[in-house]
Amino acid sequence: MNTVVTKFGGSSLADADQFKKVKNIILSNSNRKVVVPSAPGKRNPKDFKVTDLLYLCQSHIESSIPLDDVFNLIANRYKKIVSKLDLSLDIDIYLDKIKEDIENGASKDYAASRGEYLNGIILANYLDFDFIDAKDVIFFNKYGSIDSELTYTSLRKALENGRKAVIPGFYGADMDGNIVTFSRGGSDITGALVSASINADLYENWTDVSGFLMTDPRIVDNPKQISKITYRELRELSYMGASVLHEESVFPVRDAGIPINIKNTNRPEDPGTLIVKDMEPDFNNPIKGIAGKKDFTVISIEKAMMNSELGFCRKVLSILEQNCISYENMPSGIDTVCVVISDSQLKNKTEILVDEIKRTCNPDSILVHPNMALIATVGNGMSSNKGIAAKIFTSLSEANVNIRMIDQGSSEINILIGIENDDFEKGINSIYKAFV
């Protein structure tokens, strides 16, 4: 393995002790040549994230409020890190410049990005790596999207000949040189772009957990860890609410066929979770994960000969579009179709939708089922393993959970069920126990 790109999250770089752990991890493998840091995260539950403080500084200036008290919290945090690491770096030069820029009306993106920028400078100094400012290698086009061609070309040139470097996460620049940030979680995207640009052998994402779990530990006690999962399975789980990687960070490395390893900075010996493009189905463990979300409404529409009526579903979807509502799922039969809509999308528009569907589509009946939850059972071994669906349904029946809706996508790696909100936790537990 020749090149490993490592990204460290905010909890991994929250203080000097965490920096020391990161250095030990980097130096333990000479193939770890490019490091992408986040801004310092919380050191304890009552602490502040540096990025939040930087946003607050910028907001203070916009509201004509002095930022000194808030900025001192940020400055003292970085000074303490530099001091405890015994670095000769003069961090005050950078802090003074950032404070001046924010006071002079620097943009929100500029302010927010300075957490990663400062962490990058400190980490590069500590590791004796080169520092590459992300604004010089990550580029956004005029529409606010990544200019992939220019970004990849710039990164390849900056990192040629195996150069060891630190590149801050979370931000880049537009064509005029203005700082532009990704959405929250954007350091993951930076790491993925760097990995794809140099065709890295592995992208390591270091955080404070030892990989992904089969299901939510707040619902199931001590769920099993997922050792290996495909990008497709990950996408299905993340869509249904599982807390995994920033969605956009998966695409660059997936397209390049680069695996991601989710690792724990505090337990580097743990294998973590490996995310790969493809893998053979595991017939002994066909289910990779169980995830779900609450608070949906299902609109069930029935009409005789619906399947022979051209444009019926298009009319239904057009009504949703006209009301600025997106749908979650749309299972259908010969004479029926159900539209599953998140309550956050519906926003008291149920009666409007029902009236418009009646007027436009003239259905035989239309029923509304509120307070619904969706649970997805995901695994690439499901399609070639007999009895998976039966096992799910039996487990729910034995737990006295009524199934209101069933759908299996064409991918055949996901079985989706709809149940009452009140049965959500019980449903997750019963499915998990059936397979573990």
Image (tube, helix red, strand yellow):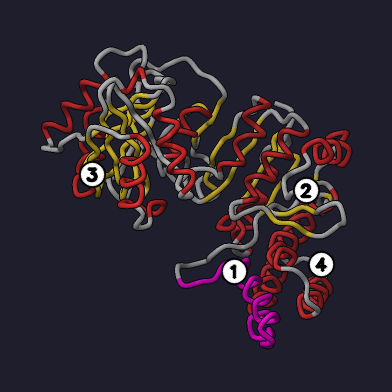
- The crowd level at tag 4 (other Cα within 10 Å; few <14, some 14-19, many 20+) is some
| In the rendered image, the vertical position of residue 28 relative to residue 284, given as above or below | below
Mark in front: 1 vs 3? 3
Q: Secondary structure at mark 3?
A: strand
- Please give the name of the residue rendered at 81% of the width and 49% of the height, measured from the top-left corner: 129
Name the residue carrying label 4. 89
Q: Which mark is residue 52?
A: 1
The quarter of the displayed image where residue 107 is located: bottom right
Please state which amino acid type lies under the numbered disc 3: His
Q: Secondary structure at mark 4?
A: loop
The residues colored magenta run: 46-72
Q: Which mark is residue 369?
A: 3
- Please give the name of the residue rendered at 39% of the width and 24% of the height, measured from the top-left corner: 409
Type of secondary structure dominating the magenta stretch: helix
Q: 316 or 257, which is in the foreground? A: 316
Please state which amino acid type lies under the numbered disc 1: Asp
Q: 263 or 57, which is in the foreground? A: 57
Cα gap from disc 4 to disc 3, whole angstroms: 62 Å
Mark in front: 1 vs 4? 1
Dot 2 or dot 3, earlier in sequence:
2
Cα gap from disc 2 to disc 1, whole angstroms: 23 Å
Dot 2 or dot 1, earlier in sequence:
1
Q: Position of residue 67 (x, y in %)?
A: 68, 83
Dot 4 or dot 3, earlier in sequence:
4
- The crowd level at tag 3 (other Cα within 10 Å; few <14, some 14-19, many 20+) is few
Q: Position of residue 359 (x, y in %)?
A: 34, 41
Dot 4 or dot 2, earlier in sequence:
4
In the shown orientation, is residue 273 left or right of residue 167?
left
Dot 1 or dot 3, earlier in sequence:
1
Q: Which mark is residue 140?
A: 2
Q: Quadrant of the C terminus?
A: top left
